[in-house]
């Protein structure tokens, strides 16, 4: 019993101490609290793109997590509205400055490490303002350099809290394009005591981007929220395929599979819908579909080599309510789709690409009345 | 018993320490009033185009917009579009139903358009077009297409050729009276001509195909159907000429087609070649 009690006391002691203490010197007050930073804090922002006279304003959502990691580094990670990673930066705080140590940027499933030429990101020493230069080489056509020159730093008050605002001149230029001109903007970033980044305003000509903090929560809460289970509409999980085709795979990463309607010409049965209809109708066993009505949809991938695979189905009745076609029916119409080697891949600028395709068989009172779309 | 009591008291004591030393974290949360929420919902709808349709961030951005303003029918409709384009009838139907409940004038005809082109669901398309008629006084043009023109297509799909001609004619006459014949969608002439031909009214069919050529001389479909009429009317030389033009234009991509879907009576090279063979076999 005493042993158990001692263990509990030890647990209490460990619980009352932070797992990582913030030993960075000169820790600014306008970041989230030490305990929040140790555990990880996430800020949710609404972003308004104010486009000027006569144009519709647009909005977006983003998330930014702050966490103290080993070696007294502050890790700041950005996510888009879908909780998808966009960038990860680490900062060291010293001499009243936040110094950018590293930055990783996500692009189309790849991670790109930014080249940091000047690393002074924020300075709250008015006599030594920040100056940063970061280059991200996305591809041979897009190599963006962003230079930021801090203009001033000043104290502010909001929500009965003290804070600080930083003002910058920022210019961004595509170095891979010789004709590209730098795009400049005036950026004002505001942090509040115990909260961190509270607001940001980016003015570029008539256009203004306003970022507003809407909510904060723990990193663990963020992880729960990001576990939403959503996928891209019409994503196909190959583990759920109904065909027995072996060795099929898309030519590129699954994230890069296009929808058929993004290609020109579309990925399709070689010879088009007309030829497919002829083929299906001449091989259809009508006895299997007696009195049947509804939509039987086969979704699949046609890869860049014109091979089809990853077949799955959607099934619904003529009132757009779920229904189940029999296994025999599903197999019967699947057979010609998987057995023919007659798919033409969709093209993008003349290059064959992987694409999602679907074919719908519409039955009414036992008759195959349409093959769609 | 006493020992057990002490144990539980200890547990209670420890638990109280746990609770008292856990930092009382206050999390910032900004509350938006209803008008602010409506503004943001509209902004998110406008901004959703930044993301590719149907991606996770697009879905979640629209979901947040719908939560903030459940009466924003543009958002409710947009939530169904990716499903529509990718073959998911159930989800399409659910989302569009919600949008129509909020704003039937804006979306009833739009759904009819989609029933017609994506699902060839002529009965439901007609029901939507007819319902829209009861809500508005003018002829409606969901997705830029006259409901009368689309009703003509629906009745063509239902093999009700009399009604089909009636609605194509209504559309053609209305546009002609208001703006002039050159403003009529040439596909109305094409389809009415096809329907006339199905009814055996070759004279009016020819008038429509030739009128179509007057306004769009490079559409393979007109020449294909004229060649078919030529054969019926024993004009082989004209048939040969027209079918060759049809094939040439078809191969150049000049035939009636729409994004996403195969249109009704869509032309195909196989069809043209079959007709060509038939012409060649004609004495």
Image: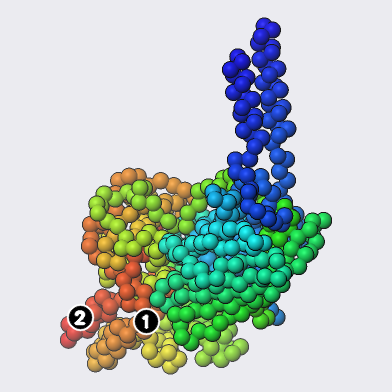
Q: How is the image coloured?
A: rainbow
Q: Residues within 10 Å of mark 2 (few under 14, many from 20)?
A: few
Question: Which residue occupies the foreground of this view, B47 or A161?
Answer: A161
Q: Does residue B218 lie above or below A82 as drawn?
A: below
Q: In the current view of this chain or complex, which residue is farthest to the right?
A: A160
Chain ID for label 1?
B
Residue B280: horizontal and vertical position, in percent? 18, 84
Residue A135, which numbered label? none
Asked if marks 1 and 2 fall on the same chain, the answer is: yes
Residue drawn where x is 63% and y is 40% of the image: A18
Mark 2 element type: helix
Residue B277, which numbered label? 2
Residue drawn where x is 68% and y is 19% of the image: B10
Residue B227 appearing in the image = no
Residue B67: horizontal and vertical position, in percent? 66, 55
Question: Along the horizontal axis of the image, is A266 left or right of A11?
Answer: left
Q: In the current view of this chain or complex, which residue is farthest to the top?
A: B1
Question: Along the horizontal axis of the image, is A319 left or right of A6?
Answer: left
Q: Earlier in the sequence, mark 1 or mark 2?
A: 1
Question: Along the horizontal axis of the image, is A104 left or right of B206?
Answer: right
| Residue carrying label 1 | B255
Q: Does residue A26 lie above or below A118 as drawn?
A: above
Residue drawn where x is 65% and y is 29% of the image: A12
Question: Which residue occupies the foreground of this view, B265 or B38?
Answer: B38
Question: Which residue occupies the foreground of this view, A6 or B70?
Answer: A6
Question: Along the horizontal axis of the image, is B178 left or right of B224?
Answer: right
């Amino acid at each position: 019993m005493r042993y158990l009690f001692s263990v509990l006391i030890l647990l209490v002691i460990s619980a009352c101490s932070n797992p990582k203490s913030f030993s960075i010197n000169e820790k600014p007050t306008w970041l989230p609290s030490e305990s929040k930073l140790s555990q990880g804090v996430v800020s949710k922002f609404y972003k308004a793109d104010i486009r000027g006279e006569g144009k519709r304003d647009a909005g977006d959502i983003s998330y930014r997590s702050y966490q103290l990691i080993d070696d007294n580094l502050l890790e700041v990670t950005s996510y888009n509205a879908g909780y998808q990673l966009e960038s990860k930066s680490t900062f060291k705080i010293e001499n009243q400055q936040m110094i950018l140590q590293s930055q990783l940027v996500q692009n189309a499933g790849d991670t790109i490490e930014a080249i940091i030429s000047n690393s002074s990101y924020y300075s709250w020493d008015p006599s030594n303002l920040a100056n940063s230069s970061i280059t991200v080489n996305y591809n041979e056509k897009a190599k963006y350099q962003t230079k930021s020159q801090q203009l001033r730093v000043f104290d502010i008050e909001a929500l009965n809290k003290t804070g600080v605002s930083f003002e910058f001149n920022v210019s961004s230029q595509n170095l891979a394009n010789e004709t590209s001109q730098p795009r400049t903007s005036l950026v004002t970033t505001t942090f509040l005591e115990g909260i961190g980044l509270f607001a940001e305003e980016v003015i570029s000509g008539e256009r203004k981007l306003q970022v507003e903090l809407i909510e904060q929560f723990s990193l663990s809460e963020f992880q729960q929220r990001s576990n939403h289970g959503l996928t891209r509409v019409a994503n196909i999980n190959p583990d759920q395929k109904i065909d027995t085709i072996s060795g099929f795979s898309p030519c590129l990463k699954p994230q890069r599979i296009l929808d058929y309607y993004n290609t020109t010409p579309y990925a399709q049965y070689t010879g088009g819908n007309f030829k497919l209809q002829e083929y299906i109708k001449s091989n259809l066993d009508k006895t299997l579909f007696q009195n049947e009505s509804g939509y039987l949809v086969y979704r699949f991938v046609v890869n860049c080599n014109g091979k089809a695979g990853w077949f799955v189905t959607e099934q619904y009745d003529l009132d757009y309510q779920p229904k189940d076609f029999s296994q025999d029916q599903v197999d019967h119409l699947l057979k010609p789709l998987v057995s023919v080697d007659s798919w033409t891949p969709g093209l993008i600028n003349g290059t064959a690409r992987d694409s999602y395709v679907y074919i719908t068989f519409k039955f009414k009172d036992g008759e195959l009345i349409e093959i769609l779309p | 018993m006493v020992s057990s009591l002490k144990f539980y008291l200890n547990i209670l004591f420890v638990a109280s320490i746990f609770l008292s030393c856990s930092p009382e974290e206050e999390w910032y949360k900004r509350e938006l009033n209803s008008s602010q929420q409506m503004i943001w919902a509209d902004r998110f709808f406008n901004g959703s185009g930044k993301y590719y349709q149907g991606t996770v961030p697009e879905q979640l951005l629209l979901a947040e917009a719908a939560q903030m303003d459940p009466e924003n029918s543009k958002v409710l409709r947009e939530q169904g579009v990716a499903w529509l384009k990718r073959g998911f009838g159930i989800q399409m139907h659910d989302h569009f139903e919600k949008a129509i409940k909020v704003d039937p004038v804006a979306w009833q005809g739009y759904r009819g358009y989609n029933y017609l082109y994506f699902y060839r669901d002529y009965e439901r398309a007609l029901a939507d077009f007819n319902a829209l008629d009861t809500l508005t006084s003018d002829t409606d043009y969901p997705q830029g297409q006259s409901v009368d023109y689309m009703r003509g297509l629906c009745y063509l799909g239902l093999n009700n050729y009399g009604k089909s001609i009636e609605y194509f004619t209504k559309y053609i006459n209305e546009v002609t009276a208001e703006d002039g014949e050159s403003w009529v969608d040439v596909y109305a002439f094409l389809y009415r001509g096809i329907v006339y031909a199905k009814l055996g009214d070759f004279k009016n069919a020819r008038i429509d195909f030739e009128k179509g050529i007057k306004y769009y001389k490079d559409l393979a479909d007109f020449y294909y159907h004229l060649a078919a009429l030529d054969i019926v009317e024993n004009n082989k030389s004209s048939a040969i000429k027209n079918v060759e033009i049809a094939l040439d234009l078809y191969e150049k991509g000049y035939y009636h087609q729409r994004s996403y879907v195969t249109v009704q009576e869509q032309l195909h090279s196989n069809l043209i070649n079959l007709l060509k063979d038939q012409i060649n076999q004609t004495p």
